[in-house]
C-alpha cells in the first residue's frame, strides 16, 4: 500500500486507532494482519498507531506494533512530536526504554525546539529523563568489538561487551555499586580487560564531545566509568585485598560522623580529570562542588548524579547507604539511621559504620525526644489559641446579637442594592 497521508485512513485503520485506545492487543494483532492496514498510517494530526500506544502508556501494544515494523522515528506529527516524546510524556519508563531500544533518536526536536528528554523534564517525568539521558545502545558498543580499518584485533573483545554494557546502563553512579558490578563478573575483573574497557570508554567520551550534536552528559558518564575501571585495575595490580580493598576504601567513613572522605575525594578527582576543559557541564559541576567543604552537602556524588541522570534529591531515605541502590528497606537495627539493600550491603558497611552507629543512635533518640517535646508544647499552644478564639467569638456574638434586631431592615436594603449592582 502507498505511504500514508495525514488523516487518509481506511476503515480498518480507523478501527486500529480505536482498539489501541481501548488497549485490545488481540484485536490490534488481528487488524495488523489485514491487507488494508498500514502500521505507519497517520491520523489527522500526523500521529501513528505507535505514537498513540506510547502516549496512552500501553506497553504490550507498543511491542506488538514494533514487531509489525512500526517506524519509531516517524516525524509527521503536526508539532514534530516523536514516539519517544510521547513515551516520555506518558511517564512510562518501560515504554521509553522500548522506544530507545528500537532505535529512537534522542536529539530530534519538536516544533518548539525541545528534545524528548527536555519535554519529559518539563512535565515532571524525571524517571523517563533518566532513562533517555543514560541510554547507550548495545549496537554502539558492539561497534568496538569488530576490527576497524587496519586493526587486526578489535579494541574490545566481544565477550566484554555484555558486562561493560551493564556497567554503562546503570543509573546508579555510586562507585561502590560500579565496583560490585565489576567484581561480580570474572571476565571484567581482570587488569587487561579493565584497561581495554577503559580505552573504549575514553574513545566514546571523545566521540560524544567531538560529534556535531555534542552530548556532554554521556561524555562525562563515560569518563567517570573509565576512572572507576582504572581504579579497579590499580587495586587489582597493587593491593592484596584487591577489589574488596577498593570497596572498603570507598566506604570508610571519618571518625566524627562516618562521612566517606576517600569516596568524595575520588569522585571530585574524576570530575576534575575530565579531559575537555571547555565543556559547560564540567564548569557547572566544578562550580557546584568546589565551594563545598569535604564532609558537607551536597556531595560530589549527588551533584554528579543529578547532572548525569537528572535524579534530584536522591540521597533520601530509600537509597542504600553502601551501594546507593534505590528501594533499600533494611534498617540498621541499632541506630535505625542507615538503610541497606540486604545483609551483604550491611556487612560490607559494618566495619566503618560500627564506629558511628552508637552516636547516631543517641542523635536519633535525642531528636525524637525533642520532637515529642515540641509536639506537646505545640498542642498546648494550639489549645490555648483555640480557647482564646472561642472566647473572643463568644464576646463578638454577644455584641452582634444585641445589635441584630436594629440592623435587620438595614441589612435587607443593602442586600437589595448589592444584588442590583451585580445584575447591572
Ligand atoms: Zn546496597
Ligand atoms: Zn547503625
Image (cartoon, helix red, strand yellow):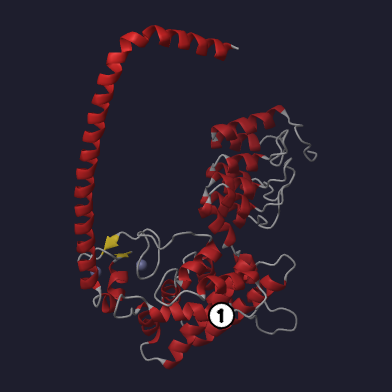
Quarter-wise, where is residue 367 in the image? bottom left
> Label 1 crowding class (10 Å Cα cut-off): few <14, some 14-19, many 20+?
some
Query: Where 140 sits versus 376, above or below?
Result: below
Instruction: Report if the beta carbon of the residue with label 1 is closer than 8 angstroms to ligand 1.
Output: no
Image position of 257 (left or right of 136): left
Which residue occupies 28% across, 61% down? 330
Image position of 181 (left or right of 362): right
Name the residue beneath numbered marker 1. Answer: 272
Give the total number of marks visible in the rendering.
Answer: 1
**Residue 177 appears in the figure:** yes
Image position of 281 (left or right of 1): left
Query: Where 212 sits versus 266, above or below?
Result: above
* Residue 101, percent from left and from top: 60, 57
Looking at the figure, which quarter contains the N terminus? top right
Query: Where 419 sits versus 396, above or below?
Result: above
Quarter-wise, where is residue 9 in the image? top right
Which residue occupies 40% across, 72% down? 296
* Residue 406, percent from left and from top: 34, 9
Which residue is outermost to the right? 2
Front-most of 279 and 66?
Answer: 279
Which residue occupies 54% across, 53% down? 128
Front-most of 411 and 228?
Answer: 411
Instruction: Tell which quarter ligand 1 is in.
Output: bottom left
* Residue 332, percent from left and from top: 24, 66
Q: Does dot 1 land on a helix, a strand or a loop?
A: helix
* Residue 373, percent from left and from top: 19, 54
**Residue 159 appears in the figure:** no
Looking at the figure, which quarter contains the C terminus? top right
Image position of 294 (left or right of 102): left
Amino acid at each position: 500500500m502507498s505511504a500514508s497521508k495525514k488523516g487518509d485512513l481506511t476503515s480498518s485503520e480507523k478501527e486500529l486507532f480505536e482498539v489501541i485506545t481501548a488497549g485490545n492487543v488481540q484485536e490490534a494483532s488481528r487488524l495488523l494482519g489485514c491487507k488494508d492496514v498500514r502500521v505507519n498510517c497517520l491520523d489527522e494530526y500526523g500521529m501513528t498507531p505507535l505514537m498513540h500506544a506510547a502516549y496512552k502508556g500501553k506497553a504490550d501494544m507498543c511491542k506488538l506494533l514494533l514487531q509489525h515494523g512500526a517506524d519509531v522515528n516517524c516525524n509527521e506529527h503536526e508539532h514534530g512530536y516523536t514516539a519517544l516524546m510521547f513515551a516520555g510524556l506518558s511517564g512510562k519508563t518501560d515504554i521509553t526504554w522500548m522506544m530507545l531500544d528500537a532505535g529512537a533518536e534522542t536529539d530530534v526536536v519538536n516544533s518548539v525546539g525541545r528534545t524528548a528528554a527536555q519535554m519529559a523534564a518539563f512535565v515532571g517525568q524525571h524517571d523517563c529523563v533518566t532513562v533517555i539521558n543514560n541510554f547507550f545502545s548495545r549496537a554502539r558498543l558492539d561497534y568496538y568489538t569488530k576490527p576497524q580499518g587496519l586493526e587486526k584485533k578489535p579494541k574490545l573483545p566481544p565477550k566484554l561487551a555484555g558486562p561493560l554494557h551493564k556497567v554503562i546502563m546503570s543509573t546508579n553512579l555510586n562507585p561502590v555499586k560500579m565496583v560490585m558490578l565489576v567484581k561480580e563478573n570474572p571476565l571484567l575483573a581482570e587488569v587487561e580487560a579493565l584497561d581495554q574497557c577503559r580505552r573504549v570508554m575514553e574513545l566514546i567520551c571523545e566521540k560524544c564531545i567531538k560529534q556535531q550534536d555534542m552530548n556532554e552528559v554521556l561524555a562525562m558518564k563515560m569518563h567517570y566509568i573509565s576512572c572507576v575501571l582504572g581504579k579497579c585495575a590499580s587495586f587489582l595490580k597493587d593491593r592484596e585485598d584487591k577489589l574488596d580493598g577498593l570497596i572498603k576504601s570507598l566506604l570508610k567513613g571519618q571518625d566524627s560522623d562516618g562521612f566517606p572522605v576517600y569516596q568524595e575525594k575520588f569522585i571530585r578527582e574524576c570530575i576534575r580529570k575530565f579531559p575537555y576543559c571547555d565543556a559547560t557541564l564540567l564548569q557547572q559541576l566544578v562550580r557546584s562542588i568546589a565551594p563545598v567543604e569535604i564532609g558537607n552537602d551536597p556531595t560530589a556524588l549527588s551533584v554528579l548524579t543529578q547532572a548525569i541522570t537528572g535524579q534530584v534529591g536522591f540521597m533520601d531515605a530509600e537509597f542504600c547507604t553502601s551501594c546507593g541502590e534505590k528501594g533499600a528497606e533494611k534498617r540498621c537495627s541499632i541506630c535505625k539511621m542507615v538503610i541497606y539493600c540486604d545483609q551483604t550491603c550491611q556487612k560490607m558497611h559494618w566495619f566503618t559504620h560500627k564506629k558511628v552507629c552508637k552516636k547516631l543512635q543517641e542523635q536519633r533518640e535525642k531528636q525524637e525526644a525533642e520532637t515529642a517535646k515540641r509536639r506537646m508544647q505545640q498542642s498546648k499552644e494550639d489549645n490555648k489559641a483555640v480557647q482564646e478564639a472561642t472566647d473572643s467569638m463568644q464576646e463578638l456574638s454577644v455584641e452582634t446579637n444585641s445589635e441584630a434586631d436594629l440592623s435587620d431592615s438595614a441589612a435587607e436594603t443593602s442586600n437589595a442594592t448589592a444584588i442590583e449592582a451585580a445584575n447591572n
